[in-house]
Amino acid sequence: MTSPLLDIEQLVVRYRGRRLGKNGLTAVDRVGLTVGAGEVVALVGESGCGKSTLARAVVQLERPESGTIRFDGRDVTALRGQAKREYRRSVSYVFQDPLSSLSPRQTVGEAIEEPMIVHRIGTRQERRKRVGDLLSLVGAPDSWFDRRPASLSGGQRQRVAIARSLALSPQLLVCDEPLTALDVSTAAQIAKVFTDLQRELSLAYLFIGHDLGVVRRLADRVAVMHLGQIVEVGASDRVLGSPAHPYTRALVDSIPVPDPAIQRQRVKLVLRGEVPSPLDPPSGCRFRTRCPHAFERCATEEPALREVPPPGTRSACHLWDRADAAEVISSPDRAQRAPAA
Ligand code: SF4
């Protein structure tokens, strides 16, 4: 078996500060995740669950406290000098707000060319040609070359930011909610840009998204995060079609169905209570204060992320010690009767 392109193991990212108490805030807690070459892995979960912190750690915008991030078999958590520059060419970051990566003073052409200048790639003529090719790849006309970000719409800016992120021919794009700031129809167009690019360039994506419909169409696999931990991971159709964790089930159930008649008839898993503070997460399973299936063991023992059926799926839930776990998780109306373990 070939090793994954990106291999994250036991990663911990902790924020420190006077207001965060003596233990700080553990935004990412012992997370493991892989992304294969050319594979699209989506990270989903409520805001504040640690998705963006994990993504930022991969592109070295956050410093992990412990754990490893391997890229192409090499530990990249403590790279320096030339090795660090090479890694930064291989992995690119697409921000939620394209203005984060575009200077208002630069033209579109200058913004896309800049990474190539920094990494001393090509002659001026070659770079200009590449900028034109990149604009065309993201469906933008050459006429944008001399425009400034302020004169572009949100969707147009995101196309430019994507073109810039491709300037160094990365193998992996880390996309941090790149559709969130866009209206529905523009988001659909930009999602198509990501799909087309992935097919054309065989890129790998670590894609953070909140629209589960887009995630299902785009991703090969989905990892679900809750309070700094991955609680379920597997093939996207399986995770989003037949969740193996009550939290995923609740996320999927929160998507409204367009047909009001069907919507009314749905038996949904409705979460109770507030999201616990990441500064003081519940003991045992961190989802237990909102989980309708919680039982005694959930308060005392942290569930491990373990293999569950079908192959390739992992879930962190004690229900999987029961033979009818899949049935219980898929039947929210059984919640109050489950389980006596
Ligand atoms: Fe719910 Fe317990 Fe499973 Fe956590 S371990 S998701 S509280 S049933």
Image: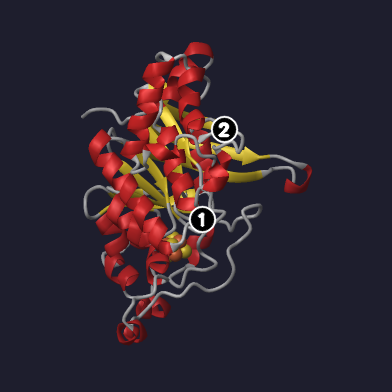
* Residue 184 versus residue 140 in the image, above or below: below
Residue 231 seen from this side: yes
Label number found at residue 181: 1
State the residue in front, 77 or 134. Answer: 134
- Does the beta carbon of the residue at mark 2 sit less than 8 Å from ligand 1? no
Could you tell me which quadrant the C terminus lies in?
bottom left
What whole-number distance in Å separates the C-alpha atoms at marks 1 and 2?
22 Å
Where residue 211 sits in the image (x, y, percent)?
40, 60
Identify the element where label 1 is drawn: loop
On the image, the x and y values in percent for residue 179 come to: 44, 53
The residue pinned by badge 2 equals: 106
Residue at left offset 38%, top offset 36%: 142
Q: Are marks 1 and 2 in contact (CB under 8 Å)?
A: no
Residue under the point 50% across and 59% down: 46
Q: Is residue 97 above or below residue 36?
A: below
Residue 317 versus residue 226: which sits nearer the camera? 226
